[in-house]
Amino acid sequence: MTLDDALSALNAQSDPDKAVQMAAYHKVERPYLGVANPVLNDLTKTWRQTLDVPARVALADALWASNIHEARVAAAKLLTQARIRPDDAVWDLLQSWLPDFDAWAIADHACMAMQKRLTAQPDRLDQVEGWTRSDHMWTRRAALVSTLPWTKQNHPKPDDLDRRDRILGWAASYVPDRDWFIQKSIAWWLRELSKHDPDRVTAFLDAHGADMKPFARREAGKYLRAQ
């Protein structure tokens, strides 16, 4: 599978009218093909099954470099899998994309791939902590979006509780940042955590809620109000 093969497969599914709509929606200047997400799922599933890890990394790297919206989403999907061995090259490639993040959809797909690599090797959180001090908003945001798996355990082990508290500390450090996407990421992390650990979310909002943007505070507490 070459880059030309992959781009030909994507172009074969293009929809010019939808591409115009997507460009207007995402508001980032890059090529759009108008390929639906389920189609990308099917294509990348087939590619994953036919390529070994080095070939997948090489294709993902080339797709990302094309700067085509659907190609970047496909690059992330190629690397979104729980069991990848060895995965150091995958993790390194995913991290190399951070400076290119400039839109939520592409960033979120890449962060989903990052989630798998972080849960596979949690000591990578030491590297993620460095993202929280980046001058690049999307990199800071990725630190929370890529660590969402630590919101989801009902009965976390002690090490995972420590990781949960560590990430909550990052979220607290973000509260003074008034950027909408940063506030949204705080709310997203807290909202998901509230389904499994409402006490920690309540404590966070008691300590920091007054300093969050109102929409973020409301979203963070959405499920607390339903309990």
Image: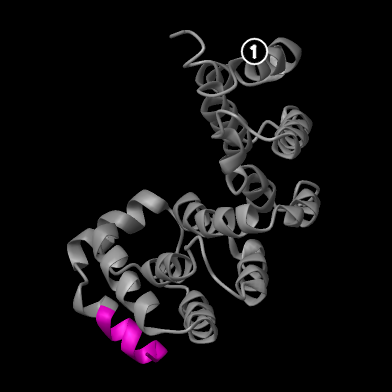
Q: How is the image coloured?
A: one colour
Residue 222 lies, in percent from the top left, at 48, 16
Circle 1 residue: 202
Task: Determine whether 208 is above or below 66 in the image.
Answer: above
Residue 216 lies, in percent from the top left, at 57, 23
Q: Residue at x 66, y 63 (%)?
A: 99
Q: How many marks?
A: 1
Q: Residues within 10 Å of mark 1 (few under 14, many from 20)?
A: some
Q: Is residue 6 magenta?
A: yes
Q: Residue at x 67, y 15 (%)?
A: 205
In the rendered image, which quarter is residue 68 located in? Answer: bottom left
Residue 215 lies, in percent from the top left, at 53, 20
Indicate the secondary structure of the residue bearing disc 1: helix
Most frequent secondary structure within the magenta stretch: helix
Task: Name the residue nearer the viewer: 185 or 213.
Answer: 185
Which residue type carries mark 1? Thr
Q: Residue at x 26, y 81 (%)?
A: 9
Q: Write down the region rendered in magenta.
A: 1-9
For residue 6, side relative to residue 15 (left or right): right
Image quadrant in which the N terminus is located: bottom left
In the rendered image, which quarter is residue 148 located in? Answer: top right
Task: Name the residue nearer the viewer: 38 or 33.
Answer: 38
Task: Determine whether 131 is above or below 207 in the image.
Answer: below
Task: Name the residue nearer the viewer: 148 or 205.
Answer: 148
Q: Is residue 217 magenta?
A: no
In the rendered image, which quarter is residue 196 located in? Answer: top right
Residue 43 lies, in percent from the top left, at 29, 72
Task: Determine whether 199 is above or below 159 in the image.
Answer: above
